[in-house]
Amino acid sequence: MQGLFFEGGDGVHNVLRALVFIAGLWTAWRSGKSAADGWAEYPTVIVYTLLLAVGMRFLHFALFEGPFLSLFYYVIDFVFLLIFSTAGYRIRRTKQMVQSYYWLYEPASAFSWKKKD
């Protein structure tokens, strides 16, 4: 029997799943930040996240005997990873724009910048 977000399991498996999930989110954050560091466009982040979601599906398959070719779980993994990779990308890109073009831009929020008045 499978749960909504993860396949079924006992307490030890749930702790291990949480660690794998946290490692996946951290990797997504770092891949988004890495794409921004290389001045790559946003579609690069999406491609990185698609590949990372395949890796996460494989870890769930190899460690927990979950389904590898499940579109439902793949989409869930992809959405969570995309949220974190996008956040990493936007925060780093905002810092880049504000630091590199300090005479033109100022931060509007952690995720965006605006022209100076």
Image (cartoon, rainbow, N blue to C red):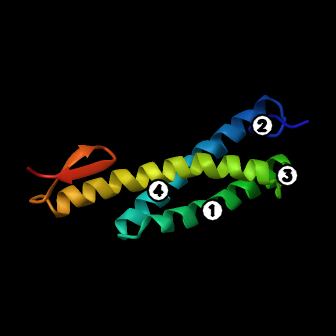
According to the image, label 3 marks what residue?
67
CB atoms at circles 1 and 4 under 8 Å apart?
A: no
Residue 49, x across and y down, in percent: 58, 60
Which x, y percent locates residue 101?
Answer: 16, 63
State how far apart marks 4 and 3 are (Cα).
Answer: 26 Å
Label 2 belongs to which residue?
13
Q: Name the residue tied to disc 4.
A: 30
Q: The residue tagged with tag 2: helix, strand or loop? A: helix
On the question of residue 91 being in view, the answer is yes
* Mark 1 and mark 3: Cα distance apart in space: 17 Å
**Are the two marked residues, 3 and 2, in contact with CB atoms closer than 8 angstroms?**
no
Question: Residue 54 location, x and y as percent?
Answer: 70, 61
- Packing grade of label 2 (10 A; few <14, some 14-19, many >=20) is some
Q: Amino acid at mark 4?
A: Arg
Residue 77 lies, in percent from the top left, at: 67, 49
Q: Left or right: where does residue 102 sit relative to residue 9?
A: left
